[in-house]
Image (cartoon, rainbow, N blue to C red):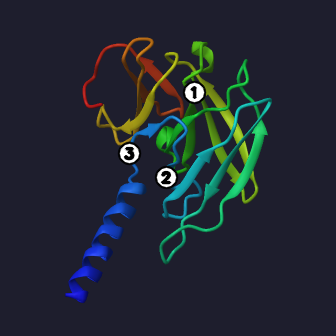
């Protein structure tokens, strides 16, 4: 009987762990999200920090034996026109070049020019803003899916304030192209 309980607990723990690090899980507001930020093949957990003139995020890097290391906090200058630092995101290899980026967005983004900004871990203690991307305003949720089946994971968002579901094609040049026709698959 004790063996069954232990196996049940281990099974539930394994299922919860797989759920928490699923690369295709949707990023909700103010929720941590996961993906291989540093390219070592292990899922890392990213948590976006508070808004202000300087932005921050923490990354808990995956460990080879399982679990996560101590979270490291990274700061970077705010790339938006307002005090927005992103409140949701996904880890995606933009352009398919083998380097993963952190694509962030913010529900309070009222300007389409501030819809997304893209971060990359550039060293053990640094994260840099590498681009800003155009898109719809005020997303409630963000998720990733290869909706055009080209091998590059694309981004989808949903908002209750704008156009509903929005589709962003992961381009070969490493950007996001907002497409208006529903390609399906999100």
Quadrant of the image occupied by residue 132: top right
Q: How packed is label 1: few (under 14 Cα within 10 Å), some, or many (20 or more)?
A: many
Tell which circle, 1 or 3, labels the residue nearer the N-terminal end: 3
Residue 159 x %, y %: 42, 20
Q: Residue furthest front?
A: 1
User: Between 119 and 96, which is closer to the camera in this rendering?
Assistant: 119
Q: Residue at x 62, y 20 (%)?
A: 114
Closer to viewer: mark 3 or mark 2: 3
169 w.r.t. 56: above or below = above
Residue at which label 3 appears: 25
Secondary element at tag 1 = loop
Residue 155 x %, y %: 42, 32
- Taking the image as shown, residue 123 lies to the left or right of residue 160, namely right
Residue at which label 1 appears: 106
- Taking the image as shown, residue 133 lies to the left or right of residue 122, namely left
Residue at which label 2 appears: 35
User: Between 62 and 120, which is closer to the camera in this rendering?
Assistant: 62
35 w.r.t. 78: above or below = below
Marks 1/3: CA–CA distance: 17 Å
1 w.r.t. 52: above or below = below
Q: Residue at x 57, y 50 (%)?
A: 46
Q: Residue at x 65, y 30 (%)?
A: 131
């Amino acid at each position: 009987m004790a063996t069954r309980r232990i196996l049940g607990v281990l099974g539930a723990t394994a299922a919860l762990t797989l759920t928490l690090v699923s690369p295709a899980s949707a990023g909700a507001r103010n929720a941590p999200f996961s993906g291989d930020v540093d390219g070592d093949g292990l899922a890392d957990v990213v948590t976006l920090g508070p808004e202000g003139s300087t932005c921050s995020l923490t990354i808990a890097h995956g460990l080879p034996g399982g679990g996560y290391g101590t979270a490291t906090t990274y700061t970077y200058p705010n790339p938006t026109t307002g005090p927005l630092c992103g409140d949701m995101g996904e880890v995606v290899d933009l352009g398919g070049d083998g380097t993963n980026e952190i694509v962030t967005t913010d529900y309070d983004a009222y300007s389409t020019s501030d819809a997304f900004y893209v971060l990359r871990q550039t060293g053990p203690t640094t994260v840099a803003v590498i681009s800003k991307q155009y898109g719809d305003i005020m997303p409630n949720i963000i998720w990733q899916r290869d909706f055009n089946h080209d091998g590059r994971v694309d981004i989808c968002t949903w908002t209750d304030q704008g156009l509903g579901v929005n589709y962003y094609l992961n381009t070969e040049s490493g950007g996001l192209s907002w497409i208006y026709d529903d390609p399906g698959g999100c």
